[in-house]
Image: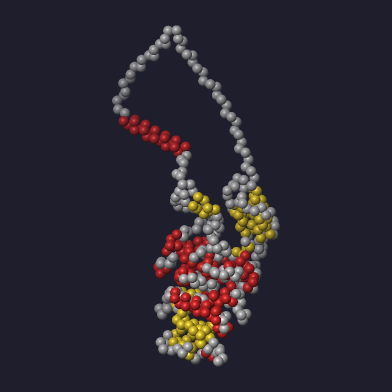
Amino acid sequence: MPILTPEERIGTLLAGRYQVESILGQGGMGVVMRGRHELTGRPVAIKLLQPSYVTDPELLRRFFQEAKASAALNHPNVVDVLDMGVEDGAAFLILELLEGASLAELLDERGAIETRELLEILLPVMDALAAAHERGIVHRDLKPDNVFVHRDLRGRPIPKVLDFGIAKLIEKDSDVQTRTGGVLGTPHYMSPEQAQGHKGLGAEADVWSMGVLLYECLSGQRPFQAESVPALLLQICTFDPLPLDERAPTVHPAIARVVHRAITRELDVRYAKMEELGGALMAGARAAGIELPSSLDDLFPPFRETAAPPPRASEPGLVTGPISAGARLRIGTDPTMARGDVVELPTTAPRRSPLVLGLGVAALLVVLGVVGFALMPSEDPVPVAQPDPPPPPDGIEPPPDVEPPPDVEPPPDVEPPAPTPIERGFDSDPTHADVYRDGALVGTTPFVLDLANEPDQTVELEVRAEGRQSRVITLNASTAPDTRVSLPRVHRERRGGGGDAPSLAPR
């Protein structure tokens, strides 16, 4: 029997119980149609997969396995999977019908989304993803099209995450391209480890994709853009995006730091769990003075309470508040606030300065003197005659007066030895770029700095050149002598693609 086209299915009965009414949308995976249960009258969404997927039994088995797992989540922010099956050569899913708009549609309409509204949408989605991760399900295809703001019968927004299990098909296909040449989803949201084809992806892959979502929704631009898939994947694996606060100055630095840590390539720095990302965002919202609705109060309590607000941008690594003895602190200038040296504080009580002790003794003597004077009687004291000293024995002369020793000249001051030079430097491409420290011009490249007077410090320098993106470099005693900074050219930016690396800086 020939396989019906989507248009030919309108007006037919699917699986003997679902009346197909209209086409809602089409994509690389298949088509989504509006339908209605023949007996209950409930409106549903019917997702029909491309016929090419049905010919692979293992792939189809894995797809239905993931669909069953997502249905078992029973989470209010996961779209309900009501039924599934294969009929007339077409595999289908029956889903709850959503009314509203996807995050992609909201972005197309507004260009960017305000921080508070975005957190109200994505924090419940993160909670749903965290529940999936606990059951071993990784989405692996998060993007604006797969986050839907559903409106219930009263018009209240309910965020929903869609398409659990679709990413399994991407991995099975072993490439970003489908067998028919179309792109499976969009690779703009792929994590570096997914772009490199790593197997066994974990929750960190979804954390990365969520970070890209946050960046795009807050700024209106994707952090990684290119005209071809290979160039895009190269950017994801090797380039850093333009700082979020430069593209969206209204975004609070506390929120921007969380977003950048979520899209950090180093897995030991990136948030390991979706709950950690959600808790950090809620802590950042508090630091930014953003009041979230009470409906979100129950989300990520262990993580949002321990997520301390980041230090001020002008004081990287600043530690505030009481610190107990023996505490371990991580100090660094990385925007993720998760890198740097670990410093262990001493466990003994601090020694007090001799000057402080001396002042304390002097104060005690003054107090005792005042008390003693207050206890003295008010009458004048009676003078007491002192007896004359006895004469020396006969034949013994009294000792002569002893002259005090002459003043001894103090030894001349000894100059301390000069510190051993610790010269660290770098060059730039292009060379002769200006080097700034604390906003002041201190030289041009190639640049050398002597760290002899601050051997344990890390010095932050900014490298600027006309027509190039500026870079920040840190120098310390362990900096390699052949360090070189590349300043990419400045290109005009376009949302959604265009330019090989318009706003990225190589690491």
Q: Nearer the viewer, residue 131 or 208?
A: 131
Name the quarter where the N terminus is drawn.
Answer: bottom right
Determine whether 390 is above or below 448 in the image. Answer: above
Residue at the spot x=60%, y=31% of the render?
412
Determine whether 45 is above or below 257 in the image. Answer: below
Would residue 7 be seen by someone viewing this image from the given angle?
no
Determine whether 171 is above or below 26 in the image. Answer: above
Name the quarter where the C terminus is drawn.
Answer: bottom right
Residue 425: x and y, percent? 66, 52
Residue 49: x and y, percent? 54, 83
Would residue 307 be seen by someone viewing this image from the given angle?
yes
Q: Name the residue furthest right.
A: 431
Q: Nearer the viewer, residue 85 or 159?
A: 85
Quarter holding residue 248? bottom right
Residue at the spot x=64%, y=73% of the render?
228
Residue 387: x and y, percent? 36, 15
Q: How is the image coloured?
A: secondary structure
